[in-house]
Image: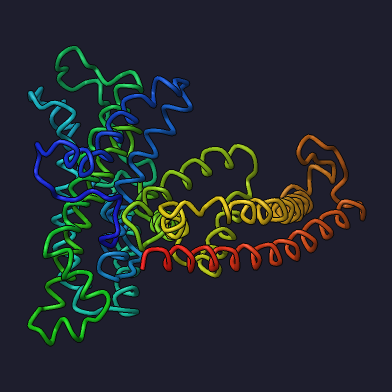
Amino acid sequence: MSAAGPGVSAAPLGRGSGFFASYGVWIAAIVVLAALPHLFSSGLALTTLCLMGTAIIFALSYNMLLGQTGLLSFGHAVFFGLGGFLTAHMMNVVESHNAPLPLMVFPLVGGAAGLVFGIIFGAVSTRRAGTAFAMITLGVGELVSSSALILRHFFGGEEGVTTDRTDLIHLFGVTFGPQIQVYYLIAAWCLASTAAMYALTQTPFGRICNAVRDNPERARFIGYNTQAVRFLAFSLSGLFAGVAGGLAAINFEIVNSAQMGAAESGTVILMTYIGGVGDFAGPIIGAILVTYLQTVMSGITDAWQLYFGLLFIGMVMFAPEGIAGLLVKQRLLLRSRRLHRVAPYYALALLPGLVALAGVSLVIEMTNQLTVHAADGPDMTFFHVAFKADAPLPWLIAAILLAGGVWLFLRAARLAGDAYDEAAAAARGATT
């Protein structure tokens, strides 16, 4: 989470065009968040939007560690899960005592839980950095996750803890029964949390986190306590992860140990890396994309996790800056009005890339049919085309699509790279 954010600075209000230049992105975000449930009003769409809002907060909180401070954590879901558990328990306590506490403030309970546990675990884990830090967070994550089956009174065992958001006090007639009301609650907290985390990147503390990430020795040499910086970043990251966990508890009305396990920690790493750790908008893009693909692909194929793994490997190998990094690279061409020179080459590379993707998907689905679903026989469909997975012709077609698509894509990608370098050099020359 670097300072290369969405172009929002801390300029004062009331400067005419300067106001819109500074806060236009946030105004646009408010408009988009308000309009989305009216454009996508189905039950599935509203549920997906709620998941995206929670995932955005969770991914941005993780990027406070990875992108901002350079700390790779394998147990970040601990704060997400603990924030959800504390929120669910607090909702049940308030409901049983008829306390006049509205639902919209309960994400603060999750945030407070995440902050407290962030302080506790951060006091131990942030004493080290690099690989040692990653291993410590992995151990802490597994320790807390496994404790859920031991401390059954608090974690509810395998069944988890349930709650009912509609039993709390209703303000202004809002019951939070309809999903659209829950969406607007999550959207409001998503916007507030995103703004708060972005504001942190613009503070001196955010700059020192970048210094600790880039050169901890030099930061230590000029007088900064790098362990204290890592500790503060870890604690604040836990706070926002707890807010996301509280929103998840409100949305699902159930919390279980799976929400703080290794799979959840792995998912947030996928979101952040795929979106891009070098730009503030990267985790937002990654959270939206991964959540959408999870929702859609899990209903299409049971091998959807394999696709995510391949996507993650491909991004790390060929585009380590993530989707946001690729988009940022086009900013120079867009400003110099030279993007149209490179766009045809991008389109040229897209077509064989889709062909290669079809070949990979066909191989995966046929393998899945012959192994996981062997009892169902070799009959299957792919893009509504019926065939037998054990026949040689489909495998030959898959091999041709995969090999030919990869070969053509690499050639087209090389041409696109050369075209980009030429256009970027011309754009830099025009500005000097």
**Image point (11%, 64%), residue name:** 204
- Identify which residue, 127 or 67, lies in the foreground: 67
Quarter of the picture holding the N terminus: bottom left
- Identify which residue, 86 or 233, lies in the foreground: 233
Q: Quadrant of residue 38?
A: top left
Left or right? Give the position of 8 relative to 331: left
- In this orientation, does residue 386 appear? yes
Q: How is the image coloured?
A: rainbow
Quarter of the picture holding the C terminus: bottom left
Q: Quadrant of residue 22?
A: top left
- In this orientation, does residue 190 appear? no
Residue at the farthest top position = 173
Picture coordinates of residue 60 (x, y %)?
30, 53
Picture coordinates of residue 39 (x, y %)?
44, 22
**Image point (39%, 55%), residue name:** 268
- Identify which residue, 25 or 157, lies in the foreground: 25
Left or right? Give the position of 266 relative to 385: left
- Identify which residue, 220 or 246, lies in the foreground: 220
**Image point (17%, 42%), residue name:** 18
Picture coordinates of residue 103 (x, y %)?
18, 28
- Identify whether 212 is placed above or below 33: below
